[in-house]
Image: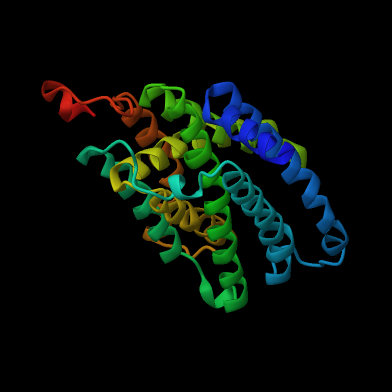
Amino acid sequence: MTTSRAEHAWKRFWEKGGWWRALVLVVVYFVLYQALSLAFTPLATQIDDPSSAAGVLVFYVLPILVGCLLVIGFAASVGWLGELFSRQPITGRGWMWIAVAVVLVFNILRFASTDYADIGFDVVATWLLAGLLIGFAEEVLTRGLVVTLLRKAGYRELIVAVISAAVFAGLHAGNLLSGQNLVATLFQLVYTFAFGICMYLAMRVTGTIIAPILLHASTDPSIFLQVAYPVEGPIAAFAAFGNPAVIVTGLVLLVFIRGRVGEPAPEAAAVYR
């Protein structure tokens, strides 16, 4: 009986939603993720080449697998797994496909300008696995759990998009802890905020969180592989504009976001949502 009451109180607490509950969730996730990832330190000390398949496995795949388990565990504990992966409660508009197209095109260009002969199948495969896990953990956390908490509190979708993207960007400030310099981190925060807006729009226009998960899953590997193993040429030169293009796209499209879950769209304003 006591356990049942505790479970009910836990679910009732999170069902109220709100920005501060979203922030608490993300902070706890970040702390647990960082702490639990320390378990792989003994393995990391055995890695001679961090860019090898074994290095990618230890430094990226195993830690982010912990992140996946954390978000799944939380979603299951509050009974939201089905809700997260069901159809979106608010529809998208045609202009939102711009965000999907920009991210996808530059991911393809980066993959197309990568020197696979110099990498090896094992490294590519491990990076693709890492990308899938990164996409799952970060999207389910920010576009799934955070968005759900904000919508349950009745916020308008513009606020939902901004806060979820800001939280997503804030997670990457943790790269300062790994020695990344301040200027690079600040640029990354701007990029990840805009990227977060694009992922929110991808979820809205496709109606499912699977779309941003897969888009995100192809983004990180395409960036890391192309930077480490580039093929010089016009495709690579054009691919270099990927990050600025995402920043401009996300920030410009942000101003057109309208609506609220459960709110009918006025006919005159429908084209702007």
Q: Residue at x 67, y 34 (%)?
A: 5
Colour mapping used in the image: rainbow
Farthest residue, direction left? 268
Residue 7, above or below 107: above
Is residue 54 toward the left or the right of residue 123 in the image?
Answer: right
Residue 241: x and y in percent read 41, 45
Residue 220: x and y in percent read 53, 54
Residue 90, above or below 128: above
Q: Nearer the viewer, residue 141 or 99?
A: 141
Residue 122: x and y in percent read 62, 76
Q: Nearer the viewer, residue 75 or 60?
A: 75
The answer to whether residue 101 is visible is: yes
Q: Residue at x 81, y 66 (%)?
A: 47
Q: Residue at x 26, y 38 (%)?
A: 91
Farthest residue, direction front? 1
Residue 203, above or below 239: above
Q: Number of numbered discs present?
A: 0
Quadrant for the C terminus, please. top left
Specify the quadrant of the image occupied by residue 255. Answer: top left
Is residue 186 toward the left or the right of residue 46 in the image?
Answer: left
The answer to whether residue 183 is visible is: no
Q: Nearer the viewer, residue 157 or 225?
A: 157
Q: Residue at x 58, y 58 (%)?
A: 133
Quadrant for the N terminus, please. top right
Residue 208: x and y in percent read 36, 49
Q: Nearer the viewer, residue 239 or 250?
A: 250
